[in-house]
Image (tube, coloured by chain):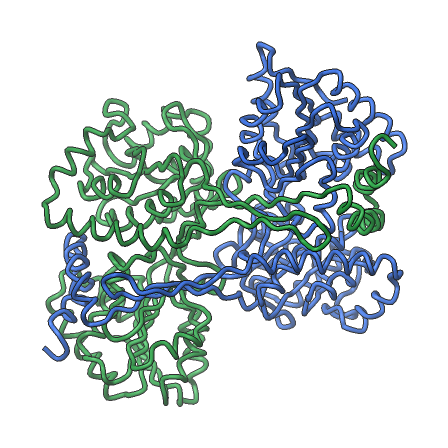
Chain colours: A green, B blue
Amino acid sequence: MAQILKSSAADFEAAFKDLLSAKRETTTDVRDVVTDILRDVQDRGDDALYDLTTKFDRFDARTKGLAITDVEVEAACAQVDAETMAALEVAAARIRAFHAKQIPDDLDYTDDVGVRLGQTWQAVEAAGLYVPGGTASYPSSVLMNAIPASVAGVDRVVMVVPTPDDVLNPLVLAAAKLAGVTEIYRIGGAQAVAALAYGTETIAPVDKIVGPGNAFVAEAKRQVFGKVGIDTIAGPSEILVVADNKNDPRWIAADLLSQAEHDTAAQSILITDDETYARQVMAAVEDHLASLERRDIALASWTDYGAIVIVDKLLDAVPLVNRLAPEHLELAMDDADAFAGQVRNAGAIFLGRYTPEAIGDYVAGPNHVLPTARAARFSSGLSVYDFMKRTTFVGCTEASLQAIGPSAVRLAEEEGLGAHALSVAIRLKGFNK
Amino acid sequence: MAQILKSSAADFEAAFKDLLSAKRETTTDVRDVVTDILRDVQDRGDDALYDLTTKFDRFDARTKGLAITDVEVEAACAQVDAETMAALEVAAARIRAFHAKQIPDDLDYTDDVGVRLGQTWQAVEAAGLYVPGGTASYPSSVLMNAIPASVAGVDRVVMVVPTPDDVLNPLVLAAAKLAGVTEIYRIGGAQAVAALAYGTETIAPVDKIVGPGNAFVAEAKRQVFGKVGIDTIAGPSEILVVADNKNDPRWIAADLLSQAEHDTAAQSILITDDETYARQVMAAVEDHLASLERRDIALASWTDYGAIVIVDKLLDAVPLVNRLAPEHLELAMDDADAFAGQVRNAGAIFLGRYTPEAIGDYVAGPNHVLPTARAARFSSGLSVYDFMKRTTFVGCTEASLQAIGPSAVRLAEEEGLGAHALSVAIRLKGFNK
């Protein structure tokens, strides 16, 4: 079972620091293996993909073809029952509606000395979306990664998904269709990232690669960064619930388990102001565990990384929350707004007693791809902005260049950049002067 | 001298592809050296910084102290002449004014089924700014990197700058003061990046690291990515000028040289619709070169990487521009707006005959830290957004959870995530039911 920490205890700061610095990922050094795979795909293109897919996914993509065709997608959609398809459609529509509100406005103005200034936002032309295979192949992830790209206006939304032993969840293809994916390839691992970054005979290269994956995928993304854009490197999932004792303990217990069941390296933390209530939640966790399909995973996560922190009053939790910078923050209390107003670092906040984190995983609308491992200190969930880029612009007239040019000339001269100074000064003198 | 390509030539596509794929950076494998330095700073903190600074910068930082004090900053400011200080102040004020317009609005609304949704933007708490030392230690870069952080509302804006042989340009410190830098340390290289990412006894860690540097600095940023946020990896500078024959050729020649003088690996390209005019610009480049202080650098860049492309009409340049995705795009023509409206990939655009790119390096207002090496396909110049992060939020009521909860339960069950389904379903049943 999870550990209990009391903020009033003498050793609390040390114990909390341990919680902050707990390494939940097994980091194996896969750099050289990934470097070799990237080079192989650059050198041999499709042939490398065929060979690596035979080796890692145990089927012959040379015969099968790398692309998953529209016919296959339609056949998969036909296998999905109506109720599930309806739920997927609710999710897709709500995710699309929220992300549409993120589209930023352009800027275009002329300042007081007559210089025109501004910036325009445009979508990247092609985005690659990595979808894990096997049991971690979640249709909700396909929606969450592809819809922002589609809403941003990306022309090519290219999905790669490994199909180990040539098996793929039909729901994943149904989600891809709903989300606006335009191309799908049955490849995975570092080789899929390489194909997206460098291109092969069959697969045209993309400009940006997003989506979760194992250590090889993460390292491949790190190595191709610069050649293409990437999203942040995702770690194991985590939830921090701040709850008073007026919540049904079984609800809060279910929320903690909904993270724990993801992965043995996931982390669930509860902060509450009532130790008796904390023990009720703990008991409810045990109750739920008994009937949970993914009991072994959830139990391991809860035992190894779960924690309950008892504070004197709930607002004492604010600085702890900001230090933990949680991926998911649930505020199950009377005035969740007042608490949220003091939170600086969190990926996503779930307000009030009727907002379990899982609602955000599927149908709320905001993205469920969120910064893990304290990365909410400096990064944000996936969004439309990840698939757009800005171009700034400046326009000087002859008169406005006279107003600001001399300062530029001075600074260029101070920096020893003579041609910089010349390019401004020669215009200050006038045309053909 | 630069090569001339004609878009009407049979071999144009091949020649243009060569231009696109020209590797202008010498990539040495510095991975292992950097890994060792990062580990050394993690293990030994300040002691590692002292030893590495003695080794690489040839002075004793143990005696001198790692921090550059306010007294040193004031002394530096006193050394700057009034006219230069005034120019620096013009630049700082204009950069601040432009970046203030980037501060994004929060979002908070309730949708048609009663779910509250939104996102809030907040500044990162601490940002690290790498400033190169020696001749590449530019005060304008300090302004461009630090002001967006200051405008965003970052609490700690921490600058690191190597001072080889214990020498530092006083203008750099004056710029740091104007830009709102709050801490300065006299360290550089991979060790400075390590200190910012992991912290030492003297230097508290930051959340995000930005700023240009050599291959060691770039690799260090790549390796600490994830632990902290980083900006994009900067390559050699580049300009693409699209000009008609009504520009004074000496103006355009100066613009091409203003990039070429940065670095022998810089690249300057002119696209024009008049071959005679192209030759006039080429002659003007030679004229200017004769009197240029950084002649050798500019000549090497222009000879090795410079190019002039002749097209039939200027609008034919649009697809070439988008494929080049230039860092700087100068549009010296009658209707620059019409051309700019068709540009998808560019870091920054300079509109019209009176807007030399150098005006953007210093005083225009938009950032001069821009994506190089075709990265404008997927990334943007440095901005206030780089120092902020978003937190999304969701708030369901009992009623609105009833509206969207069942779809979430369905999808969670399909994904085999029982606790996810439970956490929603248990609330749909009602409190204490």
Horizontally, residue B182 falls left or right of residue A107, namely right
Horizontally, residue A428 falls left or right of residue B371, namely right
Residue B183 visible within the image: yes
Frontmost residue, B338 versus A411: B338
Above or below, A42 relative to B106: above
Frontmost residue, B164 versus B240: B240
Q: Position of residue B62 (x, y in %)?
A: 75, 69
Please name the residue shown 88% across and 61% down the image.
Answer: B82
Question: Which part of the image, by quadrant, shows the C terminus of chain A?
Answer: top right
Q: Position of residue B208 (x, y in %)?
A: 55, 60
Q: Quadrant of residue A33?
A: top left
Q: Position of residue A263 (x, y in %)?
A: 27, 59
Question: Which part of the image, by quadrant, shows the N terminus of chain A?
Answer: bottom left
Q: Position of residue A54 (x, y in %)?
A: 28, 30
Please name the residue shown 56% across and 43% down the image.
Answer: A391
Please name the residue shown 36% across and 51% down the image.
Answer: A100
Frontmost residue, B425 versus A319: B425
Frontmost residue, A38 versus A104: A104
Residue A37 visible within the image: no
Q: Quadrant of residue A399?
A: top right
